[in-house]
Amino acid sequence: MKTKHLFGILFSFLCTINCVSCSDNEENKEPEGYITLNMKNEQNGKTLLGSSDVYINTANNFKTSSCFIADMGKTSGLGTPTKMLLNNLSRETAVISNHLYHIYDEDVIQDFPSGTRAIMIGSGYYKAYVVAPITQEGITTGTVVKYVLAYPETNDLPGCGENIGNIDYIGDCIEYRLPKNTELYFSAYLDDDKDAFDIQIKDGVLKVTLLKSINRIYGPYGDYTIYARSGTTFTHIKFQAGMQQ
């Protein structure tokens, strides 16, 4: 009985180890659709990463003029889960083996009044993992990179450009639900006419109330855009004033 009991404990232990091992392997599995690229530096062909302008310069650094690069640090592979970090963006960063990088188009990054930086939902970005340098006669000519196109979490935000309603007369009000702790940022056009509206958000409920009569020449009138951030992602929604009169 004791022998059988001991075997049962050992079997259970081995199953637990095996399950953990399988879980780890599954967690670090390379994502579908990834590409392996022999990325030559600018002295040896200047290979670009995907459709970006990111290349490796003579200093063995990733370099770009229209993107932002975030070094996510050392990981075990392209599929390693990582939290999005947007506070360490640069135009040039060292190419380091076993490091994961995120590459964003500069046009999809927005700084909010709180100082928090966010990426627009639906915008693709590259995850790139440096495998090993490419050498020829002892000289580094590039690096082997695995990369894949990824998309940020929506964090329950609505799609970009969604129309949340229309207001036409003084006192008209729009109510629209957003995730809790959503931060707002007004477009320049709305900011110019912000005294014509009472805009508040509480517990995720956005309220927009018209305070002035519609004036098609001097405003308020037309489409107004609000940027809404939840976590490290944002969207832009719009409301219309006077369009139904």
Image (spheres, grey):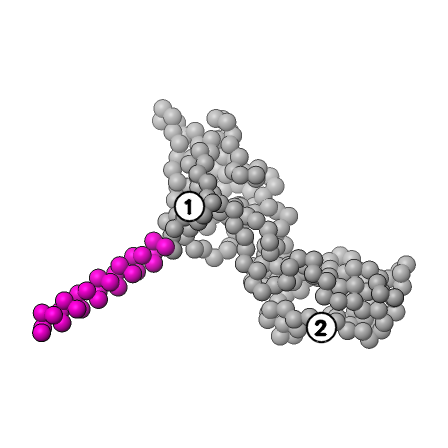
Residue shown at 80% from the left, 69% from the top: 167
Residue position for label 2: 175
Q: Residues within 10 Å of mark 2 (few under 14, many from 20)?
A: some
Q: Residues within 10 Å of mark 1 (few under 14, many from 20)?
A: some
Residue shown at 61% from the left, 41% from the top: 66
The image shows residue 134, relative to residue 22, as above or below, that is: above
In this rendering, position of residue 36 left or right of residue 207: left
Mark in the foreground, 2 or 1: 2
The image shows residue 142, relative to residue 76, as above or below, that is: above
Residue 154 magenta: no
Query: Image quadrant for the C terminus?
Result: bottom right
Name the residue nearer the viewer: 1 or 176. Answer: 1
Query: Image quadrant for the N terminus?
Result: bottom left
**Hey, what amino acid is under mark 2?**
Glu
Image coordinates of residue 230 in percent, x first then y, are 59, 64
Residue position for label 1: 99
Residue 136 seen anywhere in this rendered image of the structure: yes
In this rendering, position of residue 241 left or right of residue 97: right
Magenta highlight range: 1-26
Residue shown at 45% from the left, 55% from the top: 82
Image coordinates of residue 144 in percent, x first then y, are 42, 36
Residue shown at 71% from the left, 72% from the top: 175
The residue tagged with tag 2: helix, strand or loop? strand
Image coordinates of residue 148 in percent, x first then y, are 49, 45
**Hey, what amino acid is under mark 1?**
His
Residue 57 seen anywhere in this rendered image of the structure: no
